[in-house]
């Protein structure tokens, strides 16, 4: 029985090209299409498509596991992954875990049973035992970690330099004269939280300031978390004059808390976010934030996993993208008026 690999070999093209032609997705030259159709006819592949996929374990389908589909950042990420996969002739099954490791494990079992060609995990916990167990049980299954590292899991990784991004955000505030800078971020076990806190604390120390425990709150990467913890932090007697939010959603929550407390942004409190998601553009004033090159990261992650699935790559690597500061309207130099209020 012919397989998709046989068709690719006969037509002298990649497996993803065969999938793209048969699914009529993305652009393929007419000459390439003709070679694929000729190979399909010669091998009688079309009649045995489902069975062939089962035998070859090539389904032209990838799994994408994310923690929170309600977060607009993951909406952007999912769209970028799906668009790139579609161009390469692959479909994507989306799985949303709600940061629940049990739910994640169920999705992994589902995808493996479906004979998925590979799985992209976006920002899992650093101690994610599900991924470690998957790597051990299915060493030949292509796996990409997008935006995170997992201790003990030797897989390909596509990351943004979270440490550098947080350092840039904090240094921006320091250069504006702020010394009392709060850090509100997501889950303590999150790779992003850990690396961004390191960048935040290192920047403070480099400017001769000791990080204060009361100015650090770790919870969830959600608007509600930013509001609740922003209100708590800004209600302190010796409140910060600036807050570095672990992502833009938290930043929006801080905006809501500040307004409820009668504080103006940026006149009374400066705020910096992380991701440069839609949140940063729709709030007023626009949120100064750290831009994550999410489109480029997703394209690279999909390209890598397709290469692994097609046996074109047999080594592990970590690719790190550099973030940039997007200075908008939510930060300004510390005024004498604010200094007097907090003294």
Image (cartoon, rainbow, N blue to C red):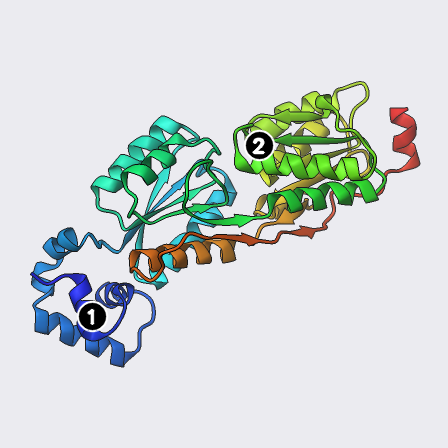
Residue 186, above or below 280:
above
Residue 2, above or below 192:
below
Name the residue: 22% across, 53% down.
59
- Point out the tag, 2 or 1, that comes first from the N-terminus: 1
Pick whichever, 139 or 75, lies toward us: 139
Q: Which residue is mark 2?
A: 223
The quarter of the displayed image where residue 195 is located: top right
Pick whichever, 117 or 242, lies toward us: 117
Secondary element at tag 1: helix
Pick whichever, 144 or 333, lies toward us: 144
Residue 106: percent from left, percent from top: 29, 31
Name the residue: 36% across, 63% down.
87
Residue 190: percent from left, percent from top: 52, 33
Tally of numbered discs: 2
Secondary element at tag 2: helix
The quarter of the displayed image where residue 258 is located: top right
Residue 71: percent from left, percent from top: 50, 39
Residue 6: percent from left, percent from top: 16, 66
In the picture, measured across the screen, residue 176 lies left or right of residue 121, that is right
In the picture, measured across the screen, residue 47 lies left or right of residue 341, that is left
Residue at mark 2 to residue at mark 1: CA–CA distance: 51 Å
Q: Which mark is residue 9?
A: 1
In the picture, measured across the screen, residue 4 lies left or right of residue 256, that is left
Asked whether residue 240 is in view, the answer is: yes
In the picture, measured across the screen, residue 286 lies left or right of residue 158, that is right
* Mark 2 crowdedness (10 Å alpha carbons): few <14, some 14-19, many ≥20: some
Name the residue: 70% across, 43% down.
167
Name the residue: 76% across, 27% down.
262
């Amino acid at each position: 029985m012919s397989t998709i690999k046989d068709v690719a070999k006969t037509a002298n093209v990649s497996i993803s090209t065969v999938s793209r032609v048969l699914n009529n997705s993305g652009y393929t030259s007419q000459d390439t299409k003709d070679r694929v159709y000729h190979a399909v006819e010669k091998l009688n592949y079309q009649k045995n498509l489902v069975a062939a996929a089962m035998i070859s374990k090539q389904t032209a389908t990838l799994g994408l596991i994310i923690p929170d589909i309600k977060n607009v950042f993951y909406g952007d990420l999912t769209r970028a992954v799906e668009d790139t996969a579609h161009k390469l002739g692959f479909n994507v099954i989306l799985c949303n875990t709600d940061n629940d490791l049990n739910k994640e494990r169920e999705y992994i079992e589902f995808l493996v049973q479906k004979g998925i060609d590979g799985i992209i995990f976006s920002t899992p916990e650093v101690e994610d035992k599900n991924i470690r167990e998957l790597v051990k049980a299915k060493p030949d299954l292509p796996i990409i970690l997008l935006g995170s590292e997992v201790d003990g899991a030797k897989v390909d990784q596509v990351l943004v330099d979270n440490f550098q991004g947080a350092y840039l955000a904090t240094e921006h505030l320091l250069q504006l004269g702020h010394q009392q800078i709060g850090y509100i971020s997501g889950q303590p076990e999150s790779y992003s939280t850990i690396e961004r806190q390191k960048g935040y604390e290192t920047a403070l120390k480099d400017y001769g300031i000791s990080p204060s425990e009361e100015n650090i709150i770790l919870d969830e990467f959600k608007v509600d978390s930013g509001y609740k913890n922003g209100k708590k932090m800004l209600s302190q007697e010796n409140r910060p004059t600036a807050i570095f939010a672990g992502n833009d959603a938290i930043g929006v929550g801080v905006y809501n808390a500040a307004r409820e407390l009668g504080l103006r942004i940026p006149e009374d409190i400066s705020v910096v976010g992380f991701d440069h998601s839609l949140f940063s553009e729709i709030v007023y004033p626009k949120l100064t934030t750290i831009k994550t090159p999410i489109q480029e990261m997703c394209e690279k992650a999909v390209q890598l996993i397709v290469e692994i699935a097609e046996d074109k790559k047999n080594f592990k690597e970590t690719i790190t993208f550099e973030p940039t500061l997007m200075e908008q309207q939510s930060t300004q130099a510390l005024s004498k008026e604010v200094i007097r209020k907090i003294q």
